[in-house]
Amino acid sequence: MIRLPLFYIVLIVVVAGCTDNSHRDTAVGSVGGDNIRVAVASNFAEPAKAIAEAFEKESGHAVTLAFGSTGKHYAQFRHGLPFEVFLAADIRRPKLLEEEGIAIAGSRFTYAIGKIALWSPDENLVDAEANVLTEGKFKHIALANPKLAPYGAAAQTVLEKRGAWKGIRKRYVLGENIAQTYQFVASGNAQLGFVALSQIQRPGKPIKGSYFVFDPALYEPIAQQAVLLKNSDAARAFLTFLRSDAALEIIKGFGYHMPGAGQ
């Protein structure tokens, strides 16, 4: 596994297409291929792995993925962390990076629009209308920090609109990002929580546990943008592949919808 600088804090570092046993100091997809470093919002981890693997097979380049909160990625890029591509969980941070001259002007585009879901591993906890939020039949509920994670901000908006925000404030646990939030619920530290639909939906498989997917009209659209941080042929090729039919099918399979598509 590729080792990133110690000051770079991420939940997971993965070299797509490599195992710990096969990795060397520099990831190489094939002879003559380049290595592309891609910072990815936590909610997009699983689709990113699948896309990176498909891209490596097609292009011969290697991809190093680093997952974390969009807010922390942004702060670290401002301090010079070297990555070629950023797949954010919002529009604001890629736009700021472009305005600050850190990202390549004109390279931003929306690659997915996310959805939030209330989820519990307990098959009987989350009901068909998500009334569990006001009935309070739980000890702890998890959500991502609204100040750092767009999915956390969306969760707060939903709770406020349903009149449940004040009632759960003493019982919520905040994840630094949506990956940590998911782990709080999966591990049982929280009985339920607001997660990205992409974290519980897998192409062609039923969702385990109980869940409720909120109408996206209830919260600001979670439009997720990609941006080029360092200009290279390999990095541009990756972003082109991200917009391909093959990548779009992967993205939709994880519960996202695409710009201009229906909910």
Image (cartoon, rainbow, N blue to C red):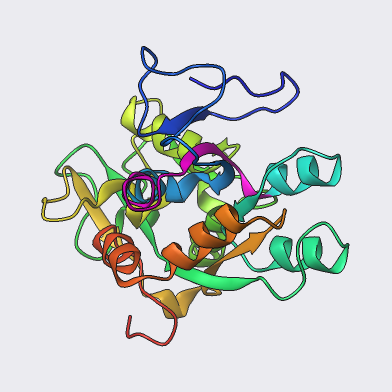
Q: Is residue 221 above or below residue 167?
A: below
Q: Is-magenta flag for residue 60?
A: yes
Q: Residue 214's quadrant in the figure?
A: bottom left
Q: 228 or 117, which is in the foreground?
A: 228
- Give the image location of residue 86, x and y in percent: 62, 53
What residue do we see at 67% from left, 71% from top? 107
The residue furthest top is: 21
> Residue at left 56%, top 74%?
220
Q: Nearer the viewer, residue 45 or 115?
A: 45
Q: Where does residue 27 sit, x and y in percent of width and height?
A: 50, 28
Residue in front for this viewpoint, 200 or 132? 200
- Residue at 29% of width from left, 62% of height from top? 255
Can you say which quadrant of the picture contains the C terminus? bottom left
Q: Is residue 122 left or right of residue 21?
A: left
* Residue at horizontal 32 percent and vertical 31 percent from the top: 186
Q: Is residue 41 above or below residue 117?
A: above
Q: Is residue 115 left or right of residue 175?
A: left
**Residue 262 covered by magenta stretch:** no
> Could you say where residue 139 lies in the image, as x and y percent from the top left?
40, 33
Q: Is residue 105 visible?
A: yes
The residue furthest front is 32
Which stretch appears magenta?
A: 53-70
Is residue 169 visible in the rendered image? The answer is: no
Question: Count the marks: how many?
Answer: 0
> Which x, y percent locates residue 238?
49, 57
